[in-house]
Image: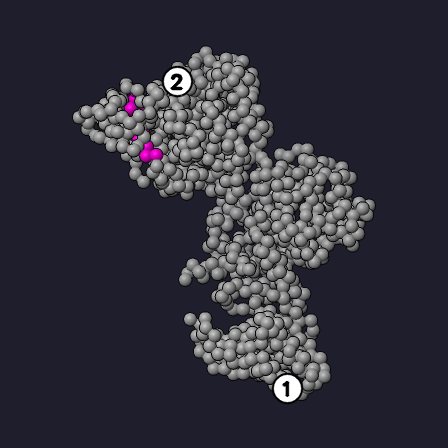
Amino acid sequence: MNWVRKDLLGLEELSKEELELILSTAESFKEVSTREIKKVPALRGKTVVNLFYEPSTRTRVSFEVAAKRLSADVINIATETSSVKKGETLIDTGRNIEALKADIIVIRHNFSGAAIMLARHVNVSVVNAGDGWHEHPTQALLDIFTLKEKLGKIEGLQVSIVGDIAHSRVARSNIWGLTKLGAKLTVCAPKMLIPPGIEKMGVNLTNDIDEALKNADAVNVLRMQFERDGETAFPKQLEYFKEFGITKERLKQAKKDIIVMHPGPVNRGIEMSSGVADGENSVILEQVTNGIAVRMAVLFLVAQANEKIKNENTD
Amino acid sequence: MKILIRSGRVIDPANNIDAVMDMLIEDSKIAKVAKNIKADADKIIEAGDKLVMPGIVDMHVHLREPGREDKETIESGTKAALAGGVTSVLAMPNTEPAIDSAAHIKMLKEAIQKSAQANVFICAAITKERAGEVLSDIPGLKKSGAIAISDDGASVENDTLMLEALRLAKREGLLVIVHSEDKKLSCCGQVNLGFTSTRLGLRGVSVASEYKRIERDIELAEKAGASIHIAHLSCKESVEMIAKAKKKGIKVTCETAPHYFSFAEEAVLGYDANFKMNPPLRAREDMLAIRQGLSDGTIDVIASDHAPHTENEKDIEFERAEFGVIGLETELAAAINELIENHLLDWGKLVTKMSLNPSRILSINKGTLSVGADADIIVVDPVKEWVVKKENLLSKSKNSPFIGRRLKGFVEYTLCQGKAHKWNL
Amino acid sequence: MKEKAKILDKDGIARAITRIAHEIVEKNKGTQGLCLVGIRNRGVYLAQRLASCIKNIEGTEVVTGALDITLYRDDLALASGVPVVRKTEIDFDINDKNLVLVDDVLYTGRTIRAALDALIDFGRPKSIQLAVLIDRGHRELPIRADYAGKNIPTSQDEAVEVRLQETEGVDEVVIIEKN
């Protein structure tokens, strides 16, 4: 199995084998972060540009650390400080970054499809760090990696995703990735936060949190955003916690060693209680650690594939 | 100037003709249609194995002039029309400024006079600035030469205002064309609501936002006793609603556009804004219902909804991209590929939907090959294949969903008012 | 691709390993402070075989580790077929050890260069020595083997393939003619 894509845009388009290759490569990369010198020269001389149109500290820092452990140079561009505010189009921005001879653009954008559009217009590698409500592939990969590390496999696992499914790129990427790898998924949310046709992605639906927890090997809890333009009918925060919040009480009804995940940052007392977030079932911090290994793997694979594509074009 | 079109298969549903004949054109009129015409022609067009049909009358075209000449002009739009076999267009009023007064119509007429390559008819705005608040001077619009009114791109929200407009239009003998969309239901939607919008992470446009507004528009038209024409049908429920209204004897006609019978919503999965239009591409079953509606006569007209947009407005983040696609140059071939090839329409019916019916609905003297009629004629090679290429499009804008597609059916000649244009691949 | 000659069979490989094991013990005056690190993939198995040989000779366990040098290569994209990154497993401290690096074939020396870079990231061994089953010449870097199972003069149109029980199900070394 070879990785041949110059970009990582989403998990929907990946095969099971490609997903497995990223996961196994990430496993090898995890070891690097345990060394005293946490650095390998694999991407020495390469430039990674983090192009972020949405504020994000976690994902940006994780990509930055990953790139630096691969010895790449990292440049961060945030909307506040760039010409983006002056009305430059995404394509122009992308081409300018390309003209700087960067090798990889890691893009976070509030519009769905932005990464795909950018990748169509530049020859450098594009890694999607979250586009609108569409996909957040590296987050899902690190979730899956963590699950696999904890439970040894993905195939046959019962995984529940709880929260605002409708507006969640994390949910979509997790659903694509986990179903391809053979997990059984349940999504659980208030009715208004379940997007139409989601069952066609191969998941079960429920509005009952206890049902979602009952037989689950793992539960992935999404971050709730209560302020959203142009959207009405969001539940009140406390009401949401009462109906859907993960508490120690609720976990008593679940499997004893159920794994609790969250992409962060956690709204304590809304999505889950502090007791759960810091409890023995939580793997939230391990997710952060694994995020680096997964992102190292992704950066390495796309850089390597693009290098090969370039060589073939010059031959 | 005499032109003889020899041995073509003449398709003229207005006169119930489908036969191999010759046709003589003298200056701008059809002089004779018969077998073996002997005449001293200045030019002879050999049309053996070709179809000879009345030029297409496209009753839904955005020429963008005045105001957005960067997208299209009357000149470039009508040139594109001719290349697609379209000899008459109805220009929609959503220009800048909107065509909402006698003065604007006068100005537009002058521009048409100066640069139009095909026949351009004028559709004026129902309300001032198409804002849905104050009615335009509807009798004045009629007097200045508008043949229809529409706020296309928007629906008149206010029921009372719409009813009043329909009453005035009936009195003046003007057709009302409606863009049936309830913006409260479709707000901010980008693609069809359902699995596609979920997959893409985009806001969806429900079919209800369309058919519920069609329901209202038909109801108001019935109340006013006015003729109403529903633009760009996209879904099954809308087709059903029209069928029901027609059965009841309400004076309603409707159109669909080639993209709605050529593509289903999956076409948009790559976030290519050349597949972004309003209403959006719907589910496969909707596409099939549109085809069926064309076949069984529920849908009267095929019109392109030619909506040019520049690359800067299209080749950007999907949510920022404008709605609409161009269609003048591909509509006939698209109809041949999807409707003739799939045996949903025969040639006579195709001409009816693309030329005769729109002429009748608009009450214009087009759509036939009768002796004495305007020589708006196309000669079509029904089997010749061609690939739609961006660089070959004559429209100023290149936002076609058909780019890269191989289509069957090529317009060899377009005669507009007797002036012949020959097209090559 | 045509197999040209078999240079070593099962017994030949076993004898070469036994000899190298003896040489390592002799040169390092026993097994005190000794460790073996095999380069993935086949070097790892050769290192394990050497360790068990040394145990037979000296009666002491020598620690072995596995090193993946993919991330240290200087030919990221030139490699035929994109290399798969495997895990590096060195679970012991290499500081002040006499470290023997083990690989199957020594050719241009670039793999060893990458391995040296990688090892330096793990610590500062007292010495690094190199053991290879086959030395086929054509060095592009100033690198030489301290222990070699067999020296084989080859042409660059040829490839040397080491096949091991653990990876290919058979112990043999063959020369292959590339077309």
Between B9 and B125, the residue placed more toward the observer is: B9
Determine whether, in the image, residue C98 is placed left or right of residue B240. right
Estimate the x, y position of residue B111 in percent, counting from the top left: 35, 26
| Residue annotated with mark 1 | C22
Q: Residue at x 68, y 46 (%)?
A: A185
Figure quadrant of residue B355:
top left
Q: Element type at marker 1?
A: helix
Q: Report if residue B107 is visible in the image.
A: no
Under mark 2, the amino acid is: Ser
| Residue annotated with mark 2 | B363
Q: Residue at x 71, y 36 (%)?
A: A235
Q: Element type at marker 2?
A: loop
Q: Report if residue A137 is visible in the image.
A: yes
Q: CA distance from mark 2 to mark 1?
A: 105 Å
Quadrant (top left/top right/bottom left/bottom right) for the N terminus of chain C: bottom left
Between B368 and C130, the residue placed more toward the observer is: B368
Estimate the x, y position of residue A204 in percent, counting from the top left: 68, 42
Farthest left residue in view? B40
Estimate the x, y position of residue B390 in percent, counting from the top left: 39, 42
**Residue C170 higher or lower than A20, as above or below:** below
